Image (cartoon, grey):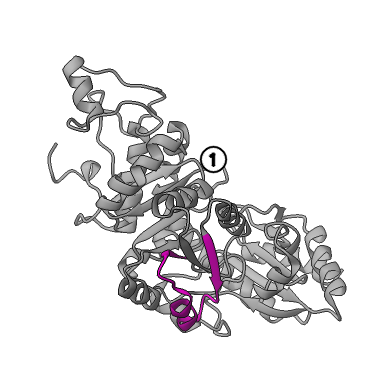
Amino acid sequence: MDDRDPHAHGAGDEYGFDTLAVRGGFERTPFGEHTEPVFLASSFVHDSAAHAAARFAGEADGFIYSRFGNPTVRVFEQRLAALEGAEDCRATASGMSAIMSVLVSLTRSGDHVVCSQGVFGTTIQLFALFERYGVETTYVALDDPDAWRAAIRPNTKLLFLETPSNPLTEVGDVRALAQIARARGIPLVVDNCFCTPALQRPLELGADIVVHSATKYLDGQGRVLGGAVLGSRDYVSQALQPVIRYCGPTLSAFNAWVLAKGLETLSVRMRRHSENALEVARWLEARPEVERVRYPWLESHPQHALARAQQGGGGAVIAFDLKGADDAARKAAAWRVVDGCRLLSITANLGDVKSTITHPASTTHGRMPADARRGAGIGEGMLRVAVGLEDPKDVCADLLRGLTG
């Protein structure tokens, strides 16, 4: 293929982000199709016995079985790798299977993980499951590099963080944490779900591995589940690929096709999400019923300067705390806002063009012990809104109904 053809190009090419989002990772078949085909095939045939043997031995390129390699899935992997600036990528069935695959690839019984406190509740539950198998996790404040440094042990195998975090939108200093990790020879793993590569590229900031819940903004329309792990070619081929091949956290070809199409509009969507969310966040900050608004693009955010330095936008997610005399009053106020919504969808998922609202203490983080929730800053009066692509004034009007009800 002509090496000037962007259909064939992956990471490190001269094309811009938006061009790679539309055309990266795609090679046309002899049929000359203009959009990516979907290969709904479980297995692939070989030219001869010798050819089959060479493929199984890894001596010849080609696909064998869709559990660990499929042409449509590969288009999504290569396109996302190009956008993240990664050498390689493996797609998985969900964001949680992506994180699980990283843990399996890097740890064994007796090992230790350092993780930021403000992570998705299910991520915490997953790390708790790994404690059954002798992998211990220590949680530290996302914004305290000294705490990260002090928590590292001789058996620590990885540092893991979300930035911005879920649901507090705290921002971690990826450059500083990368220096700490590199000094100890430990990989830094960053969950880039909220920003996506359209707004943040952790590998350029020094991270070693990036994970995604592609279910969220990479798809962007709430249609399918998916996940991804990105990193160096050596890590992906030597450590991660055996996990994908033998454990089977497989992304379906159809879901990969949907996700690859979602990447085509990623940049446009994330810019509009960020613009809309900032307008809603500023409106909330002026409301007398609201105690605090957490959004990285607000000047009041404690890591606002850091967010401006390492992100290209604030993203879609806002967390805000309501006033109240005690936990019971704050929870009642939060539930009134949720129940008053007629436009916003009451769902714990995010990443959709439709705005969503949830009460984290009773949903996404509801299985955490109450003390752990409080320690992580997730109070009974907190609500999380993922601002979609509707008119932001309509989103504000919908929230107003419950705030004043």
From the viewer's side, name the closer residue of 96 and 33.
96
Residue 102 x/y as whole percent: 43, 52
Q: Is residue 218 visible?
A: no
* Quadrant of residue 84 within the rendered picture: bottom left
Taking 72 as reference, is 46 above or below it? Answer: above
Asked whether 347 or 154 is in front, the reply is 154
Is residue 146 rendered magenta in the image?
yes
Apparent side of residue 362 relative to residue 75 in the rendered image (left or right): right
- The residue lying furthest to the front in this view is 110
Q: Amino acid at mark 1?
A: Val
Q: Which quadrant of the figure has residue 298?
A: bottom right
Q: Residue furthest left?
A: 2
Image height check: is 312 above or below 269? below
Q: Which residue is mark 1?
A: 224
User: Residue 134 lies in magenta, yes or no?
Assistant: no
Q: Which residues are magenta?
A: 136-161
In the rendered image, the quadrant that contains the C terminus is bottom right
Disc 1 crowd, CA 10 A, few/some/many (<14, 14-19, 20+)? some
- Measured as percent of width and height from the top left, residue 140 is found at 54, 74
